[in-house]
């Protein structure tokens, strides 16, 4: 598992967009969804604009203009939905369920493929003096409602983090954790 710093080629870009779309049922939300305020339109498009930023961010020429255009569209949705994501932090297959609350993925975080985030999830520092360190989340993880992940922790592959859990320590592969502070409840098979 390694999230990308940026999407370098058009093929990578198309592949990652397909991975994201697959998590939304392979049906891209259209204008009808937008007109009736279907939340899947908003959630898919905030992820899509992050992907466009990743593609255009390190390229010269007109790509700079395209980057700022998609940054602007992302920022509008971000302020409306209270979702903060940074380019280069999340691998393909991201699924965000539901709007409401607050969702923050810090810039010093790397999230693997096919991860699911629910409202209220926060990736942050343990305290204001902590600026170093990287929080890593493996592939196929499910992070429940209002879960908080603090500090530079490593979360393994196929991990489920329960609602309102506070994670401050590393979590091994296939663990199901919950509580404050988060403890291993069982292991997925």
Image (tube, rainbow, N blue to C red):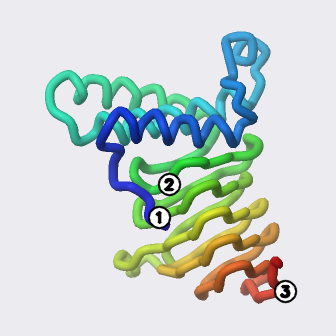
Which comes before the other along the chain, label 1 or label 2? Answer: 2
- Tell me the distance, in whole angstroms, between the alpha carbons under discs 2 and 3: 26 Å
Label 3: how many residues lie within 10 Å, few (<14), some (14-19) or many (20+)?
few
Q: Quadrant of the C terminus?
A: bottom right
The location of residue 83, given as percent across then percent down, is: 59, 45
Which residue is pictured at 44% across the width and 50% down the height?
86
Q: Which residue is mark 3?
A: 185
The mark found on residue 136 in the picture is none
Residue sitting nearer the eye, 176 or 71: 176
Furthest residue to the left? 61
Given residues 189 and 137, the one toward you in this image is 189
Q: Does 25 sit left or right of 155 as displayed?
A: right
Residue behind mark 2: 90
Dot 1 lies on which element? strand
In the displayed structure, 61 sits above or below 119; it is above
How many neighbours does mark 1 have within 10 angstroms: few (below 14), some (14-19), or many (20 or more)? Answer: many
Q: Residue at x 70, y 57 (%)?
A: 120
Residue denoted by label 1: 110
Q: Quadrant of residue 55?
A: top left
Callout 1 touching callout 2 (CB < 8 Å): yes
At x 15% / y 32%, what residue is drawn? 60
C-alpha gap between disc 1 and disc 3? 24 Å
């Amino acid at each position: 598992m390694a999230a990308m710093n940026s999407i370098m080629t058009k093929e990578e870009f198309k592949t990652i967009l397909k991975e994201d779309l697959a998590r939304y049922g392979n049906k891209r939300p259209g204008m009808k969804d937008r007109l009736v305020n279907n939340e899947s339109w908003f959630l898919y498009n905030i992820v899509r604009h992050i992907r466009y930023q990743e593609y255009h961010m390190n390229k010269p020429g007109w790509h700079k203009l395209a980057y700022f255009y998609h940054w602007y569209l992302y920022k509008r949705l971000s302020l409306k939905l209270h979702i903060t994501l940074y380019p280069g932090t999340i691998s393909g297959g991201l699924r965000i369920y539901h709007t409401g609350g607050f969702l923050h993925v810090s810039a010093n975080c790397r999230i693997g493929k096919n991860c699911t985030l629910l409202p209220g999830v926060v990736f942050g520092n343990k305290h204001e003096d902590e600026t170093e360190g990287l929080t890593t989340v493996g592939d196929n993880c499910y992070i429940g409602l209002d879960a908080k992940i603090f500090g530079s922790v490593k979360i393994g592959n196929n991990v489920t983090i329960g609602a309102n859990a506070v994670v401050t320590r590393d979590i091994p592969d296939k663990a199901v954790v919950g509580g404050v502070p988060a403890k291993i409840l069982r292991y997925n098979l």
